[in-house]
Image (tube, grey):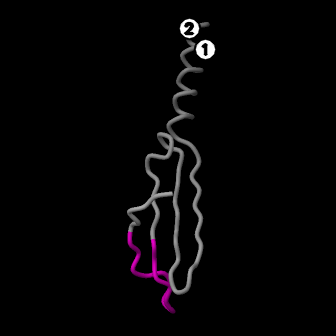
Amino acid sequence: MKNVFKGLLVAAAVASSLGGCAYGGMTTAGDKVVIARNDTFLFGALRKVFVCKVSDAGVTGCVDSAEKP
């Protein structure tokens, strides 16, 4: 029984470190908007920053930024 409990505890610790919460943010500068998306999956390995143009139709022409914060 103790081994089962230890196994479940280790599995929960591994699962919580691999899949965490995600968050995003954005800011505007003139007619452009910078959209940042980050998550804690594998300590932020999937971090993305996009630079987009704002138009009447919404956000268009998004480009993945080469520089990441």
Q: Which residue is mark 2?
A: 3
Q: Is residue 40 above or below residue 26?
A: above
Coordinates of residue 47 in the picture (x, y in percent) = 46, 54
Q: Secondary structure at mark 2?
A: helix
Q: Is residue 24 above or below residue 6?
A: below
Quadrant of the image occupied by residue 66: bottom left
Quadrant of the image occupied by residue 51: bottom left
Looking at the image, which residue sits at the far bottom?
56
Coordinates of residue 36 in the picture (x, y in percent) = 52, 63
| Residue in the picture at 46% in, 82% down | 53
Q: Secondary structure at mark 1?
A: helix
Distance from Cα at disc 2 to Cα at disc 1: 5 Å
- Which residue type carries mark 1? Phe
Residue 45 included in the magenta stretch of the image? no
In magenta, the rendered stretch is 51-63
| Residue in the picture at 52% in, 54% down | 38
Whether pointer 2 and pointer 1 mark residues with C-beta atoms closer than 8 Å, the reply is yes
**Disc 2 residue crowd, few under 14, some 14–19, many 20+, Cα 10 Å:** few
Coordinates of residue 16 in the picture (x, y in percent) = 57, 34
Q: Is residue 54 above or below residue 47?
A: below
Q: Nearer the viewer, residue 3 or 44?
A: 44
Q: Nearer the viewer, residue 29 or 40?
A: 29
Q: Which mark is residue 33?
A: none
Q: Nearer the viewer, residue 5 or 55?
A: 55
Q: Which residue is mark 1?
A: 5
